[in-house]
Image (spheres, rainbow, N blue to C red):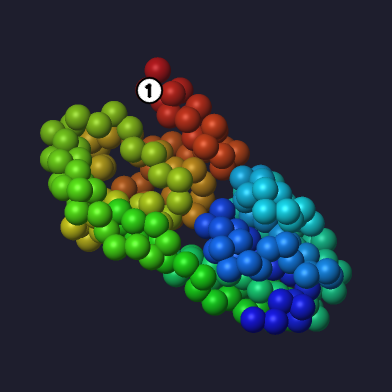
């Protein structure tokens, strides 16, 4: 992969940063700028020796696309690399391509239930998921918090279910942001609360307020 051909590399998760670091691709070559989908991803980049030139605030891929379109006056001629999850929405790439950019968006890692970055599911985690499903049905869970669309998809897969309708009406469903909310709604578990600032702290505060 010739990184020097890119003007931007977009990092929309800490996993993407870890993949690049694991392959010795960080720091980036001179002239190649990094853009982060939020402060947490920017901190991961900083720990790997890379200062993000752009940081989306509020966090998220949609916000990152908006930021790039507003800040890069030459976006129409930009060549951009976006190392993404296999589960990521392609809306970010589509928006930039619509503006004339060339976007390479290879899947860089996989998110799988019970494992990390492509590892096989843990049998112990699968057994725990069965117990969790039973507890949900019994009304024994006060709140279920989701930090990403892949977390919603992963929980359904881990429980051997096609959706998360078991959560509806039985527990408080909490989402970290719009993309996670859309994923939960599509799985039959429309969130009761959503973090206003799309951060873990904001999510925790929203849950505590709702349960108070």
Q: Which residue does the image show at 45% across and 51% down from the upper left? A: 148
Q: Is residue 28 left or right of residue 170?
A: right
Q: Position of residue 41 (x, y in %)?
A: 62, 51
Q: Position of residue 132 (x, y in %)?
A: 20, 40
Q: Which residue does the image show at 51% across and 70% down from the upper left? A: 108
- Between 154 and 183, the one nearer to me in the picture: 154
User: Where is 212 relative to 129, above or below?
Assistant: above
Q: Is residue 9 left or right of residue 156?
A: right
When asked about the image quadrant of residue 118, the answer is bottom left
**In the structure shown, which secondary structural element does the residue marked by tag 1 occupy?**
helix
User: Where is 121 relative to 190, above or below?
Assistant: below
User: Where is 37 relative to 82, above or below?
Assistant: above
Q: Which residue does the image show at 49% across and 43% down from the upper left? A: 176
Q: Is residue 13 left or right of residue 50?
A: left
- Between 154 and 187, the one nearer to me in the picture: 154
Look at the image and tell me whether residue 141 can be seen.
yes
Can you identify the residue that label 1 sits on? 211
Total marks in image: 1
User: Where is 19 relative to 149, above or below?
Assistant: below
Look at the image and tell me whether residue 187 can be seen.
no
Q: Where is the N terminus found, in terms of image quarters?
A: bottom right
């Amino acid at each position: 992969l010739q990184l020097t051909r890119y003007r931007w590399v977009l990092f929309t998760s800490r996993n993407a940063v870890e993949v690049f670091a694991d392959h010795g691709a960080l720091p980036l070559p001179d002239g190649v700028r990094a853009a982060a989908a939020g402060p947490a991803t920017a901190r991961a980049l900083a720990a790997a020796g890379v200062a993000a030139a752009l940081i989306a605030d509020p966090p998220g891929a949609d916000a990152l696309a908006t930021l790039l379109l507003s800040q890069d006056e030459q976006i129409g001629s930009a060549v951009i690399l976006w190392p993404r999850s296999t589960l990521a929405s392609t809306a970010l790439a589509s928006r930039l391509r619509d503006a004339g950019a060339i976007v390479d968006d290879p899947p860089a890692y996989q998110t799988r239930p019970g494992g990390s970055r492509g590892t096989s599911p843990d049998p112990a985690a699968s057994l725990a998921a069965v117990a969790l499903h039973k507890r949900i049905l019994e009304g024994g869970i006060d709140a279920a918090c989701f930090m990403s669309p892949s977390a919603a998809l992963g929980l359904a897969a881990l429980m051997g279910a096609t959706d998360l309708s078991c959560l509806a009406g039985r527990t408080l469903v909490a989402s970290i942001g719009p993309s996670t909310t859309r994923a939960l709604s599509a799985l039959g578990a429309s969130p009761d609360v959503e973090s206003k600032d799309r951060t873990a702290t904001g999510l925790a505060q929203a849950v505590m307020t709702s349960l108070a």
